[in-house]
Amino acid sequence: MLANGETKTFQGNLRSNETITYIVPGQQGQKLSATLEGEGVLLTVLAPNREPIADRVPSWQDTLAFTGDYTVRLSPVKGLNESGFRINLNLQAVPAPSPTPSPEPSPSPIDTPPPESQGEPQIESVPLDVPVGRPIEFSDQASSTVTKRYAVAVQPGQILSVEVLNGSVSLNIRYPSGGIVEGGSGVGNWSGRIFDQGLYQIDVTANEAAPFSLKVLVDN
């Protein structure tokens, strides 16, 4: 439906409880973008394994992690009987690999000593008991050598929200499988509806020793 490097625009009307679906065959490494014009319609994007990677948002773009058919589904905003829409779909071609430069001779270790190797930050895992509908706030400390990871049990249909209240830290929100959720890399706050049951992971990272405070909420 959508060729490499091509942009297509579709428009029409959606009635209440009606959906429109577009199938986009993509290859790993391509960049797919979907942008809606107007305010009465939202889009959901499903990966080839039918797992949502974006849920009811006005626009989305990302590099495709898998080869297969991606689904872009349009649905109206709740409470509206009918909504007009205009959507732009773009699939960028896989970039050609850059030529590999010829390696230069390594300097003598006598003239240039090799740099010290730096290991990965140590991960400290902490389970969090978050009552449904009641946010919890707590303080801790992270650093360039220690990443704090908090595991939160979430049920399908619930909403997980995480916010940095203070501190020079960043958040990585991960699925139970370990992959980073859509829009959950290097952020200060994140909120999303959960579709798969399991222990979702909140990684807190810092470039230097940094105390921080977090607010975590699980809600229906």
Image (spheres, rainbow, N blue to C red):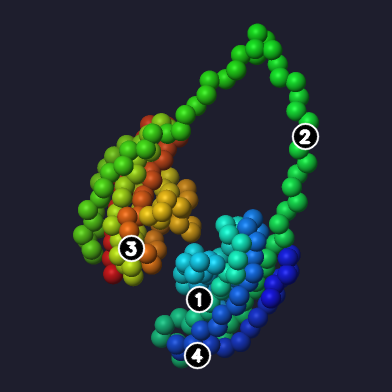
Q: Is residue 57 visible?
A: no
| Sequence order check, earlier mark of 1 and 4 | 4
Distance from label 4 to label 3 (Cα)? 32 Å
Kindly identify which residue carries mark 3: 197
Task: From the top left corner, tell me how far across and down residue 82 is, in percent.
Answer: 50, 90
Kindly identify which residue carries mark 2: 101
Task: From the top left corner, tell me how far across and down residue 67 is, in percent.
Answer: 61, 62
Cβ atoms at labels 2 and 1 below 8 Å apart: no
Which mark is drawn over residue 42?
A: 1
SS at circle 3: loop
Task: From the top left corner, tell me how far across and down residue 14 is, in percent.
Answer: 53, 87
Distance from label 2 to label 4 (Cα)? 56 Å
Q: Residues within 10 Å of mark 1 (few under 14, many from 20)?
A: many
SS at circle 1: strand
Cβ atoms at labels 4 and 3 below 8 Å apart: no
Distance from label 3 to label 2 (Cα)? 47 Å
Q: Is residue 32 above or below residue 87?
A: above
Q: Going by the picture, which residue comes out furthest to the top? A: 110
Which mark is drawn over residue 15?
A: 4
Viewer-side residue, 165 vs 89 = 89
Distance from label 1 to label 4 (Cα)? 13 Å
Residue at 54% x, 67% y: name it: 48
